[in-house]
Image (tube, rainbow, N blue to C red):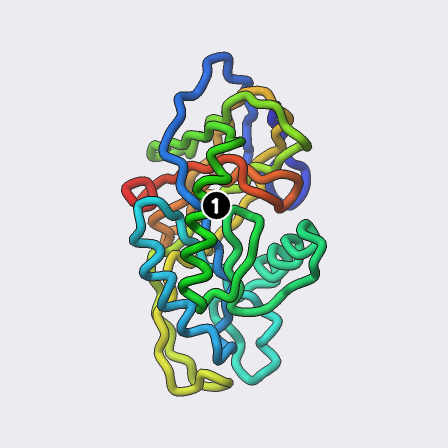
Amino acid sequence: MIHALSRRNALALGAAAIVAKSGIAAAHRPVIVELFTSQGCSSCPPADAYLETLKGRPDVVALSYHVDYWDYLGWRDTLGSAEYSQRQYDYAKSRGDKNIYTPQTIINGSKHFVGSQRSLVSGGIDAARIEGAVRRVDVEMSENKTDVMINVGAGEPTKEATLWLMAFAPVISTEIKKGENAGSTIAYYNVVRKMVPAGMWHGEAAKIVLPRSSVIPEDCKGWVALLQEGKVGPVIGAATGGVASSA
């Protein structure tokens, strides 16, 4: 069963949790690739460029998050947020390894790699595709002019799971005037601009309805629902909407 979250702005968004009695048909199950990057990180541009390749793969949903902890180096990341830095910290806590760096790529909420090391990331995606087929919860998403609807299937959870909605802009180009990348104009892909904790899942099939105007910013053309163990952990279900649904 999904309970609307009280933290952050979930209640303000008017999320409604409705138990769904019917099952959800198994859908395309992509590998989730999350890149933590920064405009102030000199080693990040190769990883940012590689994400363009990854987002074109039909078996991958690629997202990028801009952290803010390098802002002191002379350039304040125009896309950065402490919220995204916290997500990266929460991943490290969930894994128990305290490994936080940029560019860091996390695959299916679990294993991490240096985001610019293409062969390692590609191998991690291949491994995650096999591992992810073992235990998955069906998730589907649809939308209309006013709402975004997320259906989550029933399953046997090892622990409670958090349902997240990530809205992203397909590409944002930024001219960087100071810091380690001064003088560069860099394109960033599938940039997460809104991150909403939509509810908690405890194993029962459910449907959540979110007001579209509150969870999808105007510059975002795609969105992804992620069901993750605990607060931020292994991805056990995912669905896409907007431009992401045609990837």
Q: What residue appears at the point 66 percent right and 53 percent down from the top-left corner?
A: 90
Residue 79 pos. (x, y %)? 48, 66
Give the class, few, some or many, for how many residues have Cα within 10 Å of label 1's Cα (few <14, many ≥20): some
Comparing 199 with 29, the one in front is: 29
Which residue was labeled with disc 1?
128
For label 1, the SS is helix
Residue 147 pos. (x, y %)? 41, 33
In this picture, residue 197 sits left or right of residue 55: right
**For residue 37, above or below residue 34:** below
Q: In which quarter of the image is the C terminus?
A: top left
**For residue 105, above or below residue 215:** below
**For residue 120, above or below residue 204:** below
Q: What residue appears at the point 34 percent right and 35 percent down from the top-left corner?
A: 145
Q: Quadrant of the N terminus?
A: top right
In this picture, residue 244 sits left or right of residue 105: left
Residue 176 pos. (x, y %)? 42, 80
Q: What residue appears at the point 35 percent right and 44 percent down from the top-left corner?
A: 59
State the residue lying farthest toward the top: 21
Looking at the rendering, which quadrant does residue 240 occupy?
Answer: top left
Give the residue type at disc 1. Ala
Residue 101 pos. (x, y %)? 59, 68
